[in-house]
Amino acid sequence: MPFPLGEWIDTHEGCRYHLGSSGMWGSIRHPRPGPLRPGDDLPETLRRELANHLRVDAERVFLTHGATEANSWTLLYLRPRPGERRSGARLRFPEYPPLAETARWAGFRVTTDRGPARVAIVSRPRNPEGDLWSRATLDRWAAGASSLLVDETFREFARVPSVAVGGTPGVWATGSLTKFYAGDDIRVGWIVAPPEAAPDFARFHGNLADEVPAESVRLGLATVRAHGAIARAVDRLLRPNRAAWRRAFPRAAVPVGPVGFDRTEEDGDSLARRCLAASVLVSPGSFFGEPRGVRIGLTRRSFPRDLGRYLAVRDRPAATATNRAARPRPGARARARAGRA
């Protein structure tokens, strides 16, 4: 199905001041695969490595081609059954758009109500706001839902344990290598099922899901094993970027994730178009269900400069802005597009 947020970023990839990306692709490098170790059976070895890293049993970990596929398989598995009264999927907006759209396609009634629900769905840290709900806040918000699905694609940025640790009944976690690990070209994600559902979900996943290609598994294995070096590279890049955010927005919390949300009085779509006229790329909040504001990515080395240019456009009266759209740089769209939203 069409992905408007991804199309927006891809279409305007050539902007000079790029605040659209939410991942580290193009900012850090992930390692190339080295020689296999004795006894390495690639898919099972990757599952074990991920399980050790996440501190869960390997029998609960299932490989996918990315987090979007992981969320899709999970929601299809949890889909409402005929005649079931609890058909609601609870979300809080603004939220990453595929979570709501996939829930609708799976047959859920998307709701923001706090009443009984089949599943509560949330990204953690939040996309687009970049904030990290505490586990207590998460549990309070999910109260009354039969299951909880947490998209942990940004979890590594926050240095917090997975919600799957401990095996709380009904709690599902998903993730991928596309954001923190800069692994857009690897195409590896995962699902961590709750212990009571893992055996049945194994049959569901085994019957319906395609195997992850061997080369993707090799690259994924090398990347997970290089977590420490990657974490240091991410920290070196984000430290000055978060300091620049703090200076620009002294009253706002510094994002824990790789994105932040600037709530504005001006309509976000209008502001984003004014930014484009100055070759500044931000993502309108309307994509996330919040029309007043824009999402800002902190993942580029040029972030302090790019943020300064954004602030200059935002604070300039709209009547003085030009209507000329920014032209993409030649060849900008040729770069791999997967996972950049």
Image (spheres, helix red, strand yellow):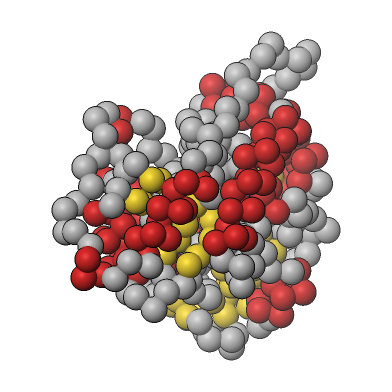
Q: Quadrant of residue 334?
A: top left
Can residue 152 be seen by looking at this rendering?
Answer: no
Say left or right for 301 vs 227: left
Residue 100 relative to residue 239: left or right: left
Q: Position of residue 341 (x, y in %)?
A: 43, 49
Please tell me which residue is depicted at 25% across the width and 39% down the height of the picture.
Answer: 328
Give x and y (percent) for residue 158.
70, 54
Image height of 48 relative to 278, above or below:
above
Residue placed furthest toward the left:
324
Q: Could you say which quadrant of the image residue 320 lies in?
A: bottom left
Residue at the (54%, 21%) spot, across then down: 215
Residue at position x 52%, y 48% in the image: 304
Question: Which of the two residues, 233 or 108, is positioned nearer the viewer here?
Answer: 233
Give the percent coordinates (x, y) of residue 86.
54, 81
Frontmost residue, 162 versus 10:
10
Tell me if residue 273 comes above or below residue 252 in the rendering.
Answer: above
Q: Quadrant of residue 314?
A: bottom left
On the rendered image, what quadrant is the N terminus found in?
bottom left
What residue appears at the point 63 percent right and 18 percent down from the top-left corner? 33
From the viewer's side, name the closer residue of 292 and 142: 292
Q: Nearer the viewer, residue 254 or 87?
A: 254
Image x and y of residue 100, in percent: 44, 67
Left or right of 236 in this view: 305: left
Q: Give the side of residue 166 with respect to residue 338, left or right.
A: right
Q: Visible in this render: residue 95?
A: yes
